[in-house]
Image: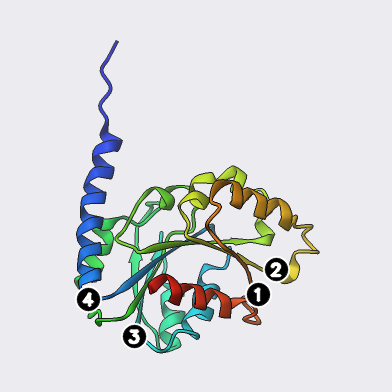
Amino acid sequence: MSDRIAVKRAVYEENDRQAALLHEIFAAKDIFVVNILGGPGAGKTSSLKQILARIKDRPVSVIEGDITSDIDTRALKDLGIEAYQIETGGDCHLNAPMIDAIVKRMSLKPKSWLFIENIGNLVCPAEFVIGEDVKILVSSTAEGADKPYKYPLAFQKAAAVILTKEDIAPYVKFDEAYFRAGVKALNPDAPVFGVNALSGEGFDAVSAWLRNARG
């Protein structure tokens, strides 16, 4: 019988070490870091745009993570937002060394916000810390009400959940009570914000929560 080598543990340990160093750097400059998780098409970028429109009292920077392409980064830059791109070339998540490498190219301002939009995936990104203060999970009604039950770790790790596309919930037969019960069972302290990223409805509450989380 062959021995097993715990490679996975070593990878996490190195990532966590780098993430802790990043968090110290951010904290020293009073930079509040938000790690945005969610599946492809959940509405992460649309939600981010709505949030950014409501927190203009402080400087903001964004790191966009994608397997390939800089579509979202260019869209944010067109809005005058300082945005930087990480293309993983196949990796399904961002990790702390990636964030460290891009941060060294950024001119992060003290007392600012840093939003990191992670790769569209409900599995791997939840497993890695990247120096953030909070994780926010974006889930849409179009994805179905069973997501907390199928992807529990992402919901357990989230400090808050943004439920997008509430305007189409009746048309996709979304069972919101079932969804919220799943979130509450996994993470009773995480608020769930129902929003419409097209109209902006619900994002005042999200922004207020973020300011309160920052303290």
The residue located at (22%, 80%) in the rendering is 107
Residue 7 appears left or right of 36? left
Which residue carries the number 4 mark? 29
Q: Is residue 82 visible?
A: yes
Using the numbered discs, state the Cα–Cα distance from disc 2 to disc 4 in whole angstroms.
37 Å
| Three-letter amino acid code at the position of disc 2 | Glu
Is the Cβ of the residue at disc 2 closer than 8 Å to that at disc 1? yes
Residue in view at x 39 percent, y 47 percent? 127
- Between disc 4 and disc 1, the foreground one is 4
Tell me the kind of residue under disc 3.
Pro
Q: Quadrant of the N terminus?
A: top left
**How did the renderer colour the structure?**
rainbow
Q: Which residue is at the front of the view, 153 or 76?
A: 153
Q: Secondary structure at mark 1?
A: loop
Determine crowd level at label 2: few under 14, some 14-19, many 20+ residues with C-alpha closer than 10 A.
many
Q: Mark 1 sits on what residue?
A: 196
The answer to whether residue 122 is visible is: no
Q: Earlier in the sequence, mark 1 or mark 3?
A: 3
**What residue is pinned by disc 2?**
166
